[in-house]
Image (cartoon, coloured by chain):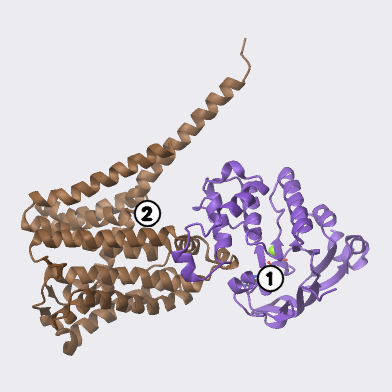
Amino acid sequence: MAGPILEVRDVRKRFGGITAVDGVSFEVREGEILGIIGPNGCGKSTLFNCILGQLRPTEGRVVLDGQDVTGLRPSEINRRGVSRTFQLLQVFPQLSVRENLILAGQEHKGSMASRLFGKRDAGLTPEADRMIAFFRLGHLADEKAGGLSYGQQKLLDAAMAFMAGPRMVLLDEPAGGVNLTMLGHLEERLRAINAEQGATFVVIEHNMDFVMRLCTRVVVLAEGRKIAEGTPAEVRANQTVIDAYLGH
Amino acid sequence: MGANAATLRAAAFAAGLLFLLLVPLGLSRYGVYIMSLWAVMTIAAMGLNLTLGYAGQVSLAQGAFVGIGSYAVAILSTNGMPFIVPLLVAVGLSFAIGWLLGYPALRVQHHYLAFVTLAFSTLVYLVFRNEEWLTKGIYGIMGFKRPTIFGISTATPLAFYYFCLAMLAIATAFLAWIVRSPWGRAFVALRENPVRALSLGVDTRRYTLMAFAIGSAMGGFAGAVYAPLVEFVDPTPFTLALSLNILMMVIVGGSGFFFGPFLGAAIAVLLPEWLRFAHGWYLVIYAAFVMGLLIYSPTGLLGVADRWTANRKTRRASAERAAASASLSPEKP
Ligand SMILES: Nc1ncnc2c1ncn2[C@@H]1O[C@H](COP(=O)(O)OP(=O)(O)O)[C@@H](O)[C@H]1O
Ligand SMILES: [Mg+2]
């Protein structure tokens, strides 16, 4: 088997006096769905931000496909085939659903100049419409994203992360605030993309059922440190984890 | 429905164009001058609308770029160059300086950015006034001619007005092309959510610099037309007041709306003329109008129109829903 797609090596992030992430290491293997769980404020989102270039780690390295990408800009990391969603919903409310998706794909092909002189939709309308159908947003393609319901925007947010055919997607609490129907729907879509395209996922999630069903492996954080790692069943049975988190 | 709106828009566009082509024929010299000034200010405001309205980057320096364009044309034209050369220099120079002015925007936003661009504006004014070897200082530059295009002289007010209109058409077509390209989409993304845009591969740094450079280049382009319009270039028109005035045009017309600057510039240029009877009260009335408008519609005049059509759409949609549910619900006894 090839090496891991992503290696996080001893990443540490300090904000003034607070150490939000305190020396975390783990690997992500090609094609897996890795869950990251832990109590609120234990540094999960900060860890994502360090991996994806939104924040620069105080110490440690982030290695993608064997290449050190620590401190690269988020746009550069994204164009290497790693996309994400944020914990708080982030779509572009003034753009239509289709425009949101085209935007999510347009910077991945050609040059700045080709984006000015080429087609208006960068040739992405078919792909955007395919994505719209896949996430069952068909009737909303021309609506402004700001006018969609919360759950629909959340689906759009995820669809945008998949638009450019990424190899790996990092999802920060995709189930947060989403109703059960939408959640089942999202889960099914993630599974399909994982199975059909072999995309790798890292998912931060509080909904334990969702994590236990979806993930092949789980990393548990508490107070900025990794306290356990293993299959969902192993993690569930781990006494440290129960004390730190699941026991609540 | 969609086709109807498109026809309506095409009709409005044709009517506007006809108005701009025919009305000056019946106006005095001064009236024609005012219309020419409107065309020039619209070009400048369109540039700022790209930087601010589309890409969300505050600038209080658009007036300085009009000045840079004007001086470039005045200085080079008095040296006897054909108009196209000074024009290209004005646009190219403004593009380059605008690009550099974009760098602070990579570090600071909003009112901090406003202060940086304000300082730049003041600096440029001081260069116009004090660097006499280049700009002739407060004495100003004159003695350059209006251009001759394809053998046709634009020396008369009416001919020059049509020249301004042609320049406005070029600027409009150029901006329409930019905002409808993927760049336009990236600019809007930069305005609405730079963090998300960055995570989707949008090189926000490069687009920020581009938004400044292109917007400023259009300011320089407006200046290149302004110089031969007034036929005398000195520092006085290019104080901070001009930048503020252009900013006002963008906001009053509707920031981020393609035709906003056309309306905003019309109000800023024509209102003082219409309010002449009010003498000193003119500014008070203008200020009251702007405040009233922005309280009613923070998105400017075209924002009002947008709200009306949105309301109509919502009403129509709810009527359709009501009709649909009425036809679905069983007959009541
Ligand atoms: N930009 C920031 N500046 C200062 N402190 C921060 C910042 N971002 C996160 N933190 C702190 O870091 C800790 C971890 O936050 P976060 O990564 O959001 O946790 P989680 O996603 O696991 O809930 C929290 O104590 C939070 O207050
Ligand atoms: Mg979080």
Tag 1's secondary structure?
A: helix
User: Looking at the image, in which quadrant does ligand 2 appear?
Assistant: bottom right
Badge 1 density bin: few <14, some 14–19, many ≥20, Cα 10 Å = many
Question: Which residue type carries mark 2?
Answer: Phe
Q: Position of residue B191 (x, y in %)?
A: 47, 62
Residue indicated by mark 1: A46
Q: Mark 1 — on which chain does it sit?
A: A
Q: Nearer the viewer, mark 2 or mark 1?
A: 2
Q: Is residue A247 above or below residue B308?
A: below
Residue found at the very far bottom of the displayed protein: B133
Q: Colour of chain B?
A: brown
Q: Colour of chain A?
A: purple
Q: Position of residue A26 (x, y in %)?
A: 80, 74
Q: Nearer the viewer, residue B333 or B15?
A: B15
Question: Which residue type carries mark 1?
Answer: Thr
Q: Residue at x 56, y 57 (%)?
A: A124
Q: From the Cβ of disc 1, is ligand 1 less than 8 Å away? A: yes
| Picture quarter with the C terminus of chain A | bottom right
Whole-angstrom CA distance, mark 2 to mark 1, is: 37 Å
Q: Nearer the viewer, residue A173 or B295?
A: A173
Residue indicated by mark 2: B257
Say which quarter of the image contains residue B53.
bottom left
Residue found at the very far front of the displayed protein: B151
Q: Position of residue A105 (x, y in %)?
A: 58, 61
Q: Is residue B35 above or below residue A78?
A: above
Q: Residue at x 71, y 81 (%)?
A: A67
Say which quarter of the image contains residue B313.
top left
Q: Is residue B275 visible?
A: no
Q: Position of residue A80 (x, y in %)?
A: 65, 72
The reply to whether dot 2 and dot 1 touch (C-beta < 8 Å) is no
Is residue A216 toward the left or the right of residue A56 in the image?
right
Q: From the Cβ of disc 2, is ligand 1 less than 8 Å away? A: no
